[in-house]
Image (cartoon, grey):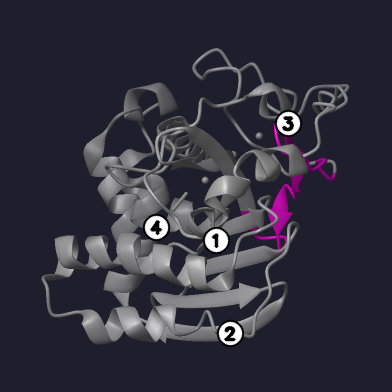
């Protein structure tokens, strides 16, 4: 399967120009493996491109350049420069963007395919309500790499959304379903034991064959109050499941011990930690 953070600088630079080579070139390069590229195979974590993110971050001395997200002054969207995917700085005015990343797939160990860009959002009030008492006196840099902080982020009832923006034009809904069966399934087994096949099937069955996800499609995976995981595709809700285990297992893919994008996880946690200082 396939970084999930920003006061702003006085003037925002334009997003870096996109490579002249169209995305379709990547798809063409993988044509020989067309059947296999539709499925999620072994993953290589991409290097983080922070250009777009750093243009929005303050230079607070206790944080790296990309720390301390702010929604003041109608913050501009953040662009993942390698794919051109643009992420709003907030969702529904309450969840702040914590970081962006790129999900890549390695085809037979020969070719990396950009599958989707993703952004992770979290509710500022929930962060303070659930984490400020325990971590409010610690700086973001002190919380870097803190496993207990990461665990509390996954366990607490904090509203969060992972926004997936498809960049690979030949991705099928069946491959998405298969990928989640593998990745979420492994987390369900890790955190809840082996007897969770029914829960996994309830989740993956939401990705029905009739859905089309061409390049530019948006999938939202949202943990809402009460540990409800709500899924939508291009704005259409496709299902919701109340399960703390499922919510944790899904978010673990992006901010857990073995995330899809390690640098993204660091960005997310640093920015969430910075909210506690405000």
At label 2, counting other C-alpha atoms closer than 10 Å, the crowd grade (few under 14, some 14-19, many 20 or more) is some
Q: Which residue is mark 2?
A: 238
Percent across and percent down for residue 70 are: 69, 39
Q: Which tag is nearer the camera, tag 4 or tag 2?
A: 2
Instruction: Please give the name of the residue rendered at 40% of the width and 42% of the height, measured from the top-left corner.
Output: 43
In the picture provided, is 78 more to the left or to the right than 277?
A: right
Give how far apart the Cα atoms at labels 3 and 1 are: 21 Å
Give how far apart the Cα atoms at labels 3 and 2 are: 30 Å
Q: Secondary structure at mark 2?
A: strand
Say which label, 3 or 2, has the lower sequence index. 3
Instruction: Please give the name of the residue rendered at 16% of the width and 60% of the height, measured from the top-left corner.
Output: 190
What segment carries the magenta color?
74-95
At label 1, counting other C-alpha atoms closer than 10 Å, the crowd grade (few under 14, some 14-19, many 20 or more) is many
Percent across and percent down for residue 74 are: 84, 45
Q: Which residue is mark 3?
A: 81
Q: Which residue is mark 1?
A: 161
Give how far apart the Cα atoms at labels 1 and 2 are: 15 Å
Q: Which residue is mark 4?
A: 251
Say which label, 4 or 2, has the lower sequence index. 2
């Amino acid at each position: 399967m396939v970084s999930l953070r920003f006061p702003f600088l006085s003037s925002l630079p334009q997003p870096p120009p996109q490579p002249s080579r169209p995305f379709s070139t990547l798809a063409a390069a993988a044509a020989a493996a067309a059947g296999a590229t539709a499925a999620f195979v072994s993953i290589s974590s991409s290097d983080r491109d922070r250009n777009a993110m750093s243009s929005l971050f303050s230079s607070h001395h206790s944080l790296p350049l990309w720390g301390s997200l702010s929604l003041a002054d109608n913050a501009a969207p953040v662009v993942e420069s390698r794919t051109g995917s643009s992420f709003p700085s907030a969702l529904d005015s309450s969840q702040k963007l914590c970081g962006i990343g790129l999900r890549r797939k390695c085809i037979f160990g020969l070719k990396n395919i950009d599958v989707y860009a993703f952004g992770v959002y979290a509710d500022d009030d929930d962060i303070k309500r659930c984490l400020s008492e325990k971590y409010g006196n610690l700086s973001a840099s002190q919380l870097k790499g803190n496993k207990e902080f990461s665990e509390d982020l996954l366990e607490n009832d904090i509203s969060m959304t992972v926004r997936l923006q498809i960049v690979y034009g030949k991705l099928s809904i069946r491959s998405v379903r298969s990928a989640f069966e593998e990745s979420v399934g492994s987390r369900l087994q890790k955190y809840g034991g082996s007897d969770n096949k029914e829960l996994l099937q309830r989740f993956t069955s939401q990705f029905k064959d009739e859905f089309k996800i061409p390049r530019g499609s948006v999938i939202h995976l949202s943990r809402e109050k009460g540990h409800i995981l709500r899924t939508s595709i291009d704005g259409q809700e496709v299902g919701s499941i109340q399960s703390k285990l499922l919510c944790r297992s899904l978010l673990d893919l992006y901010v857990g011990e073995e995330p899809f994008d390690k640098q993204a996880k660091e960005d997310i946690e640093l920015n969430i930690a910075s909210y506690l200082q405000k």
